[in-house]
Image: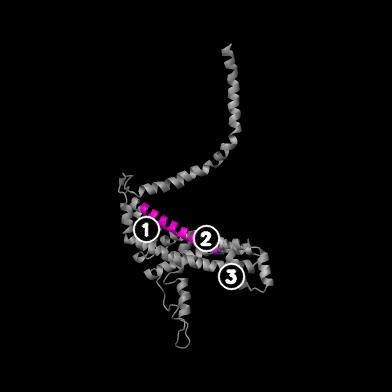
Amino acid sequence: MSDAIMTKSEPVQTVSRIEKLKANSHKWIPYVFISPFFIVFAIFGLFPMLFSLFLSFHYWEPAAGFGAMEWVGLENYIFTLGDDWFHTSLYNTFWMALASGIPQHLVAIPLAFFIHTAFTRGRNTIMGLYFLPYITSTVAVAMIFTTLFSRDYGLINMMLTSIGTISIGDFQPFAILFPTENIDWNQPEYTKTMVSFVVFWRYVGWNTILYLSAMQTIPKDLYEAATIDGATKLKQFFYITLPMLKPMMFFAVTLSIIGSLQIFEEPFIITDGTGGIDQAAKSAAMHMYITAFQEGDFGTASAISWFLFLIIAALTWGNNKIFADKESES
C-alpha cells in the first residue's frame, strides 16, 4: 500500500515543480534577454581591458608566435614615466587637444544659436550639412586636407599668400599676420596646427548638433518674455541660452576631453604613421600603437594605455567638479 501511495504522489510533485518554475519565470527571463549584451561586453570589452592591465606588469614581445610572458612588476610603468618620447607624445596630445577642442565649442555654441533663431525652415538640412564631416571617412578627410595643405599647390597656401601679398603702394599691411611665401606644413612648427585644424573641422559640426538639440528643449516662453522686456538677441544668448546649456556643455566637453586625448587617425594618416619630423604630431595613442605593433613591446604599450586612461579619468573628474560647482552656485 505504501509503495502505491508513493508512486501516485510522484507526478503531483513533478507538476508542482514545473508550475513553480513558470511562476518564477518573470524573475529570470529578463536577464536572458539582456544577457547577449553582457556576454559581448565581457568578451570584447571587459576581458581586453583586464588583460591589458595584466599585460602591463609583464614583458611580452611575441615575434614569430606568442612568446612566454615575463613578470617585470612596475618596470613598464617606470620606463614609461622616464621615456622622453612618451613625454613628447603627451605634450603633442595636449597641444592638439586644446588647439582643436576649445575652438570647437567657441564656434559651435554661437553657430547653433544662430541656426536655432534664424532658421525655421530647412533647419534639418542645415544640420545634416554640418553633421556630414563627422560621418565622413577619416582617411578621406585626412587625404583631402593633406592636398589642401600642400606647400606647392595647396589651396590653403594660395589663400594665405594672396592675402599676405596685398600691397598698398609699397606697403603690405597684412604681411604681419599672413605669410607672403608658401608654408611647408610638414615642418615641426606647423604640423600640429595642420592636424588640429583637421580635427576642429571634423568635430565642430558634431558639437553644433549637440548644442542645437539642447536649444530646442529650451521653452520658447523664456525668449518671448525676454523680447517683451526689450532684451536683445545678444542678451538672450548670455542670460537664457548659455545658463540652460550647462548640462549639454558638460556632456560635450566631456566627449571632447575623451576624444581629443585619444586622437589617433588624423595625425597617423597625415604624417604617414611617423608622427612627422621630430615627432611633432605624434600623439600618445600613436606612441602606444608604435610601441606595440612596430617595436613589439606589448607590455610597455599596455602601461602607456593605462597612463592615458588615468589622465582622461582625472580630467573628466575635474570637468565634472567644475560644472557641478557652477550648478551649485546657480
The residue to which callout 1 is attached is 287
**Distance from Cα at disc 3 to Cα at disc 1:** 42 Å
Q: Residues within 10 Å of mark 1 (few under 14, many from 20)?
A: many
The residue to which callout 3 is attached is 238
The amino acid type of the residue labelled 1 equals His
Point 59% across, 19% down: residue = 9
Tag 3 and tag 2, C-beta contact below 8 Å: no
- Secondary structure, mark 1, is helix
**Distance from Cα at disc 3 to Cα at disc 2:** 19 Å
Residue 317: give x, y in percent of width and height.
47, 58
Magenta residue check for 245: no
Q: Residue furthest bottom?
A: 169
The amino acid type of the residue labelled 3 equals Phe
Q: Residues within 10 Å of mark 3 (few under 14, many from 20)?
A: few
**Front position in the image: 59 or 138:** 59
**Front position in the image: 239 or 65:** 239
Residue 2 makes an appearance in the image: yes
Residue 253: give x, y in percent of width and height.
50, 62
Question: Which stretch is magenta?
Answer: 302-330
Position of residue 84 relative to residue 41, above or below, is: below
Q: Residues within 10 Å of mark 2 (few under 14, many from 20)?
A: some
